[in-house]
């Protein structure tokens, strides 16, 4: 074969490999559930700022949460592969063949291995709190999502996130009970909102968590009530007078959730939950900043 032809074939193979590699990276990024992972990581970052963590400790805390969330997202997509294939979920990178199961499994394992030392670097009690939350999320992916206790891992993992931050402070203080309650309510509400668009596919593939058992109308109502309860707890829980922003946030949350309840079959309830969480974070930073 002439040298020029060989070079052309080599260049084509290199180009194809680069394109395949880029597609795999995009597939991994899509398989980690980027929106929830980013939202929880930003929530943790806001908590570190509100609690007054030193910059170095805050970076480790946020890094641990990011690693944990990546491991949970990749574990979720890998565990759901068979069901996603059965449901024809071409929006899922694994089901669409954009990335290989081995790559997602390896990425989940690496992220989990990073999460452990990063969590423990924040202190033994803080690290234990975070790792219990991550373990609960993995338990949801691997088993509990098919049971009536599907909401428990969400409530537990979210409820322990403030403890992970405050236990890493000097003296290892526990967070105030109202903050733990608000985070747990938000987590449970996010669970109900997140599954609303996929209830039929879930039931067809054997996923019978509590939202699937209750049905879409009841689950949509519960999602709204739980998220509203979370906001109300953040508004009235801290000592002192409720600020004007707090009352405005509570009214806006109720309006947004009522609007989302009109379209429970789409992604609007989950997106509304994320928007409310963002507004709650602003309130939290203002109220807890030393």
Image (cartoon, grey):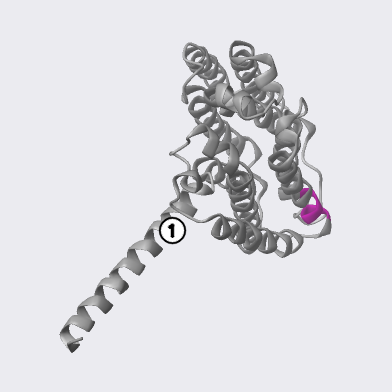
Please name the residue shown 77% across and 56% down the image.
127
The span picked out in magenta is: 125-129
Tell me the quarter of the picture where residue 123 sits: bottom right
In the rendered image, residue 231 lying in the magenta stretch gets the answer: no
The C terminus is located in which quarter?
top right
Tell me the quarter of the picture where residue 235 sits: top right
Compare residues 235 and 268 and report the one nearer the observer. Answer: 268
Tell me the quarter of the picture where residue 227 sits: top right
Mark 1: secondary structure: helix
The image shows residue 205, relative to residue 142, as above or below, that is above
Compare residues 16 and 271 and report the one nearer the observer. Answer: 16
Q: Is residue 61 visible?
A: yes
The image shows residue 247, relative to residue 24, as above or below, that is above
Dominant secondary structure of the magenta stretch? Answer: helix
Residue at the far bottom in the pictured view = 3
Compare residues 38 and 110 and report the one nearer the observer. Answer: 110
Residue 255 spot, x, y in % from top left? 50, 14
Please name the residue shown 63% across and 49% down the image.
75
Please name the residue shown 72% across and 48% down the image.
134
- Residue for badge 1: 24
In the rendered image, residue 127 lying in the magenta stretch gets the answer: yes
The image shows residue 233, relative to residue 70, as above or below, that is above
Q: Horizontally, is 290 left or right of 12 in the view? A: right
Q: Can residue 57 be seen in this view?
A: no
Residue 206 spot, x, y in % from top left? 67, 29
Check disc 1: other Cα within 10 Å, few if <14, some if 14-19, many if 20+.
many
Residue 34 spot, x, y in % from top left? 50, 45
């Amino acid at each position: 074969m002439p040298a020029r032809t060989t070079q052309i074939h080599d260049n084509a193979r290199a180009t194809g490999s680069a394109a395949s590699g880029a597609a795999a990276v995009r597939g991994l990024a899509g398989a980690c559930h980027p929106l929830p992972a980013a939202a929880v990581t930003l929530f943790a970052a806001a908590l570190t700022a509100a609690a007054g963590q030193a910059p170095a400790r805050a970076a480790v805390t946020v890094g641990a949460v990011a690693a944990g969330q990546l491991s949970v997202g990749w574990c979720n997509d890998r565990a759901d592969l068979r069901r996603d294939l059965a449901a024809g979920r071409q929006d899922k990178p694994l089901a669409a063949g954009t990335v290989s199961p081995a790559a997602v499994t390896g990425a989940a394992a690496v992220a989990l291995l990073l999460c452990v030392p990063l969590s423990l670097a924040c202190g033994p009690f803080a690290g234990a709190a975070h790792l219990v939350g991550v373990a609960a999320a993995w338990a949801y992916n691997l088993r509990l999502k098919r049971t009536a206790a599907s909401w428990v891992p969400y409530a537990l993992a979210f409820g322990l996130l403030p403890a992970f931050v405050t236990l890493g402070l000097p003296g290892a203080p526990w967070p105030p009970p109202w903050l733990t309650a608000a985070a747990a309510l938000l987590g449970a509400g996010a669970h109900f909102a997140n599954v609303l668009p996929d209830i039929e596919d879930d039931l067809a593939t054997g996923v019978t968590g509590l939202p699937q058992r209750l049905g879409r109308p009841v689950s949509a109502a519960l999602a709204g009530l739980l998220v509203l309860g979370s906001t109300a707890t953040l508004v009235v829980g801290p000592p002192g007078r409720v600020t004007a922003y707090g009352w405005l946030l509570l009214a806006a949350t109720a309006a947004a959730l009522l609007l989302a309840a009109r379209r429970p079959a789409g992604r609007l309830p989950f997106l509304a939950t994320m928007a409310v969480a963002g507004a709650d974070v602003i309130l939290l930073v203002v109220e807890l900043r030393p």
